[in-house]
Amino acid sequence: MAAEEAEEALGLFIGIGLSEAKARETLRNGALSALLRQAVLQARSALGPALDKATGTLLYNAAARLRDPKHLGFLVGYIVRREILTDLQLSAALEYVRTHPLEPLDTADFEQACGVGVCVTPEQIEEAVEAVISEHRAELLAERYRFNMGLLMGEARSRLRWADGKTIKNEVDLQVLHLLGPKTEADLEKKPKAAKARPAPAEKQKAAVVENGEVGTETRSLLEQLRGEALKFHKPGENYKTEGYVVTPNTMALLKQHLAVTGGQVRTRFPPEPNGILHIGHAKAINFNFGYAKANGGVCFLRYDDTNPEKEEEKYFTAIREMVEWLGYQPYAVTHASDYFDQLYTWALELIRRGHAYVCHQKVEEIKGHNPPPSPWRDRPVEESLLLFEDMRKGKFGEGEATLRMKLIMEDGKMDPVAYRVKFTPHHRTGDKWCIYPTYDYTHCLCDSIEHITHSLCTKEFQARRSSYFWLCNALDVYCPVQWEYGRLNLLYTVVSKRKIIRLVETGAVRDWDDPRLFTLTALRRRGFPPEAINNFCARVGVTVAQATMEPHLLEACVREVLNEQAPRAMAVLEPLKVTITNFPALKALEVLVPNFPADESRGFHKVPLQPTIYIEETDFREEVDKGYKRLAPGQPVGLRHAGYIIAVQNIIKDASGHVIELEVTCTKSDVAEKPKAFIHWVSEPLVCEVRLYERLFLHKNPEDPSEVPGGFLSDLNPDSLRVARNALVDSSVLSARPFDKFQFERLGYFSVDPDSEEGKLVFNRTVTLKEDPGKVGAGPGAVLSRDLEAALSRERYKSKSSGQEQQKYMQHGDWNPKELAI
């Protein structure tokens, strides 16, 4: 704006009641100042140069809040004719023009919606307030001026929508004063705060907000978060109410056809590329797309974006569907972008005919980057592009020699994105039919249109493609869905890039895509993470627009919550030490009943044998006792979990190198012996098994960040990310376990049967320990608690139990500290 124009506008803005500071601030906003100048000039031409402040305020609010400038003159006309007199009426008028994008507007309907011509008399206000006060008379007399007067105001306003708010407030004050009289000293005393009600125990399912990588809880389930009203998403068929949605003369007719197809049902889709395995970030996308549809009575498609045959493999198609169903979701339909290749090609021809696309011969490297040179073929004749595109389809161009590009500029400045490229690669579904394949930018929105998707939910990085999404649908005059973006979910201490995972596999750092140290969904399943835990984690992260980068221990906490309820208990020994009971009280093995869930014995028991020979953890015995050490040592007996016996060391047997290889002990019934300081787990007649103990794969939080890991992510591998106990022992209750069955090995953690298990040799993966290690920097899921912290937890937990027999029962059957082995 030139200096003279700016000075003129400044005078106009001050003339409608703006302060000089506010007027200058408005001038800095070019779009707003242009609209406000237009509105003021229109008003002055009708009312003269002197505009009162009330009119000026309405003009300013209209210019500031109007989304579509074409309606400005229409609204200003109502303001200068004194037909819109209040901000309430103006708000209704702005909402009306926003939700009725097509011209011409229905004037009669508009005026009714905005209260034009409605006159509310003082008598009507008096009667409405009187009626409201009459309904609340008893409460008013009881609470007097402590009563919420805003309630009276709100109810009176609801009866007289277009009444002036100040007039209603004055009437409420007057009638309350008449009923109650002046305030007394008691009325002026502060109202005591009511005690907050504690939530019921059932209110366990919580949603969360992400604050600095941590999860804060609030009592909203995932479905509650995903209900359309909570997210303020548009209703099906009301796409045009979404900010930024482009309305064309055909929009309303297309939406009407869309509603005829869907019946007003919410439709979403989950559109993965079948060129890799899904990871934890995809779990949020699955939950969001399928969950939003479910929460709103809709359906969700699983659509494979199979437009790049070079990288697609059948195993990825199978694994993707398997993981979606593993998380508990059933697709309404399983579709492929390739289902629509014929239609997409037909539309590409139409796009060329309409002058919106052209065949280009620039090389890939020429059009890469932020400021590539414009294509010299951008303005080539339509007929020429049609012939060349047909030549592309017939294979007359080599790869990289020709592309079909769309004529548009995207939000990120990218100019003329590619719609089709040449690839002489057979497609897994269409074979050799095509040698040209559509790109994501071209395919995505049109497939959404074909499937009548109502809400195209995608991660934030696709926001730059929103304009091309709307542009392409409108350029072809087809139904245009609405794209909504949400924040990605990332985890620290891992990589999820397909290229990087392939490098990890190629270098032998991990076995495959389902290596339990990765955070692909197949890896998490193999490790033993239950799908409910992953879904709960996504719910706790919440529906966020900002990217969420979370610590792995937050996911692991969700795993513990689920497995605590689902995983039956068993006993296992990772580093066995043989123990012989010299005074075993029976001639044959005793049967010991072990509760599957000690906190709820109604869920059953399993039997384990107790023989004269048992095995304990090697770390549960010490020859010399340190302060605070409570487990087995000479002169310090311990109890055997669930067995009802206490053992005391009589003899220590060592090998030639001085290593303890066996203990000879005596046993005493626990009900006649002095209470021991601790109870330990044990096995007898056990099964030999392999146990794989996993830690974090990387040492640093951000292994891909050069500032943290200058040598690259492969240089950041944790050498102790996998330890294998090849001759661990587990009680025979798990003999019939199958792959992915889950158990809690008492005092050790949660474990899952690995698919590598064979007849006679089970393999277990440690899923998580019973507790995380908050004090170990870079500690992985398998880390033990620090000794000081564990000792403190032991003391506090033990103190919290009552004394005597109840305490004894706790020591035998109760919740156990996750790794007393560390003490």
Image (tube, rainbow, N blue to C red):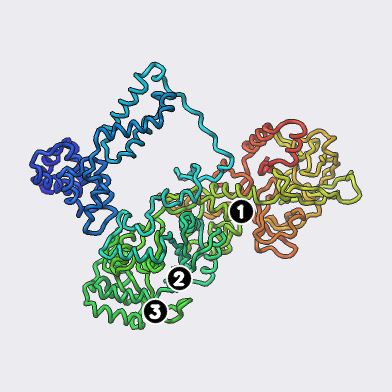
In the image, residue 10 above or below residue 573: above
Q: Residue furthest right?
A: 587
Q: Nearer the viewer, mark 2 or mark 3?
A: 2
How crowded is the residue under tag 1: few (<14 C-alpha within 10 Å), some, or many (20+)?
many
First in sequence, mark 1 or 2: give its number.
Answer: 2
Q: Where on the picture, by quarter, is residue 740?
A: bottom right
In the image, residue 405 above or below residue 40: below
At x 32%, y 81%, the residue is 390
In the image, residue 160 above or below residue 282: above
Tell me the SS state at disc 1: strand
Look at the image and tell me in which quarter the C terminus lies.
top right
**Residue at the spot of label 2:** 336
**Residue at the spot of label 3:** 435
The amino acid type of the residue labelled 1 equals Tyr
Tell me the SS state at disc 3: loop
Q: Look at the image and tell me whether residue 713 can be seen.
A: no
At x 91%, y 49%, the residue is 587
First in sequence, mark 2 or 3: give its number.
Answer: 2
Q: Nearer the viewer, mark 1 or mark 2?
A: 2
**Residue at the spot of label 1:** 694
Name the spot of residue 502 as percent of width and height, x first: 51, 64
